[in-house]
Image (cartoon, rainbow, N blue to C red):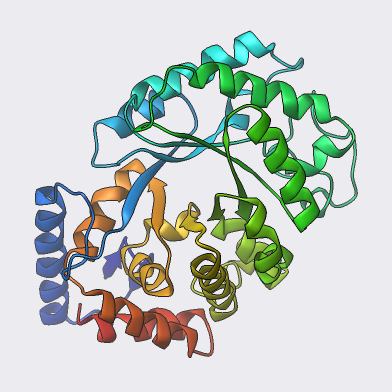
Amino acid sequence: MLIDGSLGTVRSGADPVESARMVKESQERAAKIAQWTGPARTKDDHRVQLLANVQDANAARIASETQAEGIGLYRTEMSFLSATEEPSVEEQAALYGKVFAAFPESKVVVRTLDAGSDKPIAYANMSEEENPALGVRGLRIARDNEALLTRQLDAIAQAAQGRGDQAPTWVMAPMVSTAREAEWFASLCKERGLTPGAMIEVPAAALMADKIMPHLDFVSIGTNDLTQYTMAADRLSSQLAYLTDPWQPAVLRLIQHTCVVGRDTNTAVGVCGEAAADPLLACVLTGLGVNSLSAASTAVAGVGAQLAEVTLEQCQSAADAALASEGASEARDAVPAVLAV
C-alpha cells in the first residue's frame, strides 16, 4: 500500500521498487524544503512574493517565524464568528494592531468581513436565506449597512497608523462583482489613506476585470470560491470534490484573463486561495502571470523550494499545458513532465 499525502492518493498493490523510489524522492524534496531560506525566485531569477494567510495574532506570529514576506490574507471575520454584537472601532483596532505587530516592516493585506454562507456572523448576516452561498455575503452586506463597513475601515486605518512605506496596509473587499462596487469600495478606502483592492472570486469579476481594475491598486484571486462559482459546485460537498478542484482548466482560464488585464492596467494580481499552497500549481500560477502567492505559513517553504528549481519559461509552458487540458486530473498529470519534476 502506497499513500501519497501530498496528492491525497492511496494505491494498493504498489510496486515495491517504485514505492522505494518515490519515498526517496519525497525525502529528498523534504530536505530541499528544509534548506530553503527565501525570498522566492525562479531558477532564472524571476521574483515571486510569498505571503501568509492568517486569521489572528497568534497565526501572524507563527507566520513571522517562517519565510513568509508578509501577510497576503488576513481573514478578519474569523475573530467575530462567535460575537453577538459588533465590536467597537477601538476593539477592532486593538485586534488588527496585534496582527500588524507581527510584521512591522512588511505588507499586510486585510480582507474586510467575509461573512455569510459557511461563515455566518450574528451581527452582520441576514437571519435566513434560501441559498446563502449566492446570497448577501461579503461586500454585499454593506449595501444596506454601509456603516458596518466604514467602521471596520476606520478601525483598520487606526491600527495601521505609524506603519511606514515599507509596511503598507492593503485592504480588499470579498465578493466584488461589478465595477461600480469596486469604485465605491475604493473611494471608502482612499478616504482613510488605505490601499484599495478586491477579491476576484466571482466569475463576473474576472470577466469584467478590465472595468474593475482601473478603480483598484491590486486584486487577489480567491481560488476556493472562484472554483465553486465557476463549476457551480458547493465547495463543502465531498461528492463534488472532483469539480471543486483549482486545477480545473476553466478556472485557470479565468485566472489567465485576470493576469492579462492586470498587466495591461499595471494592477498587481495575487492568489490567496488554497491553490497557492500547491507547489506545482504555484508554478502554473506564476506562468499565468500571478505576482504574489499567499498560503498557509506551513506551505510557504514548499512553494518557494519548488519555484527555485524551475525557470519562468518552464512555468509558462506548464501553464500552457494545464490550460490545454480537458479537465483537472489531466492538467495535474501534464504539468510534472513539463517542469521535469
Specify whether 30 is left or right of 298.
left
Q: Is residue 52 left or right of residue 111?
A: left
Q: Considering only vertical position in the picture, is 289 above or below 141?
A: below
Q: Is residue 71 left or right of residue 26?
A: right
Whether residue 288 is situated above or below residue 31 in the rendered picture? below
Which residue is located at x 15 percent, y 80 percent? Answer: 18
Could you tell whether 141 is left or right of 207 in the image?
Answer: right
Residue 204 or 241: which is nearer the viewer? 204
As rendered, which of 264 and 112 lies closer to the eye?
264
Expressed as whole percent of the image width and height from the top left, the position of residue 173 reads 66, 43
Q: Position of residue 282 (x, y in %)?
A: 36, 65
Residue 69 seen in this snapshot? yes
At horizontal 66% and vertical 68% (from top left) the residue drawn is 210
Image quadrant for the C terminus?
bottom left
Residue 246 in sight in this render: no
Image coordinates for residue 85, horizontal then vertical, percent: 76, 15
Q: Using the rendered view, name the quadrant where residue 60 is placed.
A: top left
